[in-house]
Image (spheres, rainbow, N blue to C red):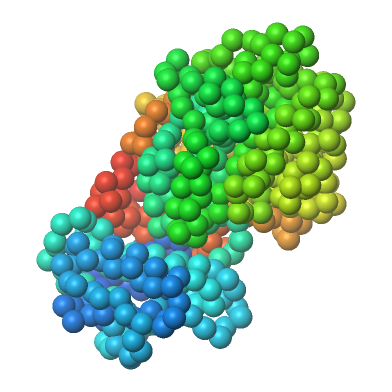
Amino acid sequence: MRQRRQHRTLARLLGSLVLVAAAGLTSIGASAPPSAAGAPRPLGQIVPAPASVTAGGSAYTIGSATVIRVAAGSPETQRIGDYLAAVLRPSTGYALPVTGGAGADGIRLLLGAGDKALGDEGYRLTSSNGAVTVTANQPAGLFHGVQTLRQLLPAAVEKKGKQPGPWKIAGGTITDWPRYAYRGAMLDVSRHFFGVDQVKRYIDQLALYKINTLHLHLSDDQGWRIAVDSWPRLAGYGGQTQVGGGKGGSYTKADYQAIIAYASAHYLRVVPEIDTPGHTNAALASYAELNCNGVAPPLYTGTNVGFSSLCVAKAVTYKFLDDVVREIAAMTPGPYLHIGGDEAHSTPHSDYVAFMDKVQPIVQKYGKTVMAWHEITGATPVQGAIAQYWGTLGNEAQVAAAAKAGTKLVMSPANHAYLDMKYDAKSPLGTSWAGYVDVDKSYAWDPATFVKGVPAGAVLGVEAPIWSETLTNSSQIEYMAFPRLPGIAEIGWSPVSTHDWASYKVRLAQQGPRFTALGINYYRSPVVPWV
Ligand code: ACM
């Protein structure tokens, strides 16, 4: 498994302290009363918790005459209306026509909220007996409002066959916007390869919890997963196996663009990662000239880390990276390109610094913002670079110093946010180098304060990575991601004032039937009071 064991005991100890602190909160948490049969779900009982909820007034009931009204002349709003209709039609059995015709009734999805506080991703949802109206400044906000609307309906709304209803949305107003601009999930498609349909399935699940970033870990020792025309053996040879020796795979450019289009339609940006200078055995195996000794190593199907390095002294290394970055940047509409930089244990430190000094400007040359794992803070991050923190201790002075000097942070503390950590000793999947991470522990942290000395304004957001050494299919990904992913999504979206395990675990428990209705395989953690 991943061999990052240096601080394991201390991390475990800190983890237990966090659990004790979290347990102390239960005395102040109020559980929501279970709703009576046929009564609408209480307005705020969703994940992530909304910024502001004012409940009151009569509920809206979706019926056979309900129309979905979208802004006239806005194809994007029309598409969001069609998306909502596709969720609601099979289970309700209603026609739910989507129309640009104005009207005060029905489900109304409107742009022009006229409320700056909502930003680009926020929305307002108002429900009464005449209509449910979602307004936003931007389509992304409408899309997030639609996710809220889904969760306000009974879980059976997610089923593919007709259900009895009734389909009520409690009266009142939700005004909601995200705490952080970056709310990500990472999928490691290198240790095991996951095809386009598997990635789309994960995107569907991420969108439900208002995640807006999909980070794809596209290369590692065990496989190179994206076609690069100027270096065809990367995918053609370096992509043909995976952990355990299976056949692996890689995305054609059309595949990658299909993932990006699907992600964009769900208001997620894609962050491609090409991990360098370590984690590069698949590339080194594909091209002998990339190795300092000119000899290509064999393909690798084990799970060790830290044994491979690009050749920092060779000019061809930078020609290679210029080509790879150029081709991937050209296909990627999002602003970020991730260059890895973690666990470069086979790259001498001075080489690592020199390497990063050469590679970061390549990323900038092709119009992208540099993203890298937090080890980049031991080199010289360029202006505007983003470091992704994956430590467990929160006392890394080097990370704090970089943040004070302007490097932004995305927070993925492994002992809370890594979805591949085992829940407990009995977990059949996952690894445990950062300790066991049950659902309460994954929720028990604050991105703004996790690393000592980091200014709160340096934190761009959160990300939940899932590494795939032990994971081979969607069902296994889901078992590890659910139910922890919604908690990381909530930490990224919801105001810190709403952060409370005692109330969160009740809202999370109510997601169980929704997971089931959606066919999501999830871990029935004993710390959650499942309904
Ligand atoms: C990492 O887990 N090596 C980023």
Evaluate whether residue 26 shows in this view: no
Where is 233 relative to 145, above or below? above
Q: Quadrant of residue 74?
A: bottom left
Count every numbered label the image shows and give the total: 0
Q: Residue 402 in the image: x percent, y percent?
A: 81, 46
- Residue name at image x 36 percent, y 82 percent: 100
Residue 48: x percent and y percent?
Answer: 45, 61
| Quarter residue 425 falls in | top left
Classify the position of the C terminus by image quarter.
bottom left
- Residue at the far front: name it: 230
**Is residue 78 rendered to the left or right of residue 492?**
left
Residue 347 quadrant: top right
Residue 370 appearing in the image = yes
Front in this rendered view, residue 186 or 54: 186
For the point 44% across and 53% down, which residue is it?
Answer: 262
Q: Image check: 2 left or right of 94? A: right
Measured as percent of width and height from the top left, residue 2 is found at: 57, 23
**Image point 73% across, 16% down: which residue?**
289
- Decide if residue 92 is on the left or right side of residue 468: left
Which x, y percent locates residue 308?
A: 68, 18
User: Residue at left 50%, top 77%?
Assistant: 136
